[in-house]
Image: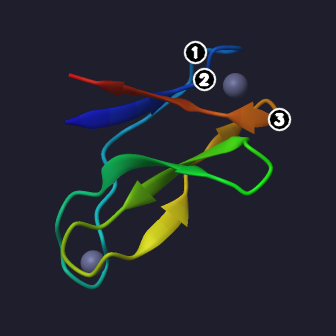
Amino acid sequence: MAAYTCDECGMSVGVMTCGTCDVELVHDTIVKGDGSSVHVCACPECAGKIKSPMCCGQDMECELN
Ligand SMILES: [Zn+2]
Ligand SMILES: [Zn+2]
């Protein structure tokens, strides 16, 4: 399962679920037109995406266990 942690302060966010499908969101990365990448959480069922959580002004990193 995936959890997000902040490199700065160590705060972590547990697994998030899709409110529509009630399944765990999976980590995904979107590469934007300018070449930068954005961490997102995607629902494997409905293909919905939300931006990954932020802490201390930066994207939290996802650790896949
Ligand atoms: Zn933090
Ligand atoms: Zn969904």
The Cα–Cα distance between marks 1 and 2, rounded to whole angstroms, is 5 Å
Dot 2 corresponds to which residue? 6
Query: Which residue is located at x 73 percent, y 41 percent?
Result: 36
Which x, y percent locates residue 47?
A: 32, 75
* Marks 2 and 3 in Cβ contact (< 8 Å): no
Dot 1 corresponds to which residue? 10
Dot 3 corresponds to which residue? 57
Which x, y percent locates residue 56?
A: 79, 29
Tell me which amino acid carries mark 3.
Gly
The Cα–Cα distance between marks 2 and 3, rounded to whole angstroms, is 10 Å
Q: Secondary structure at mark 2?
A: loop
Q: Quadrant of the N terminus?
A: top left
Q: Compared with residue 60, is residue 32 higher up or lower down, i.e. above or below?
A: below
Residue 54 placement, left or right of 3: right
Query: Which residue is located at x 29 percent, y 57 percent?
Result: 25
Q: Compared with residue 28, is residue 49 higher up or lower down, i.e. above or below?
A: below
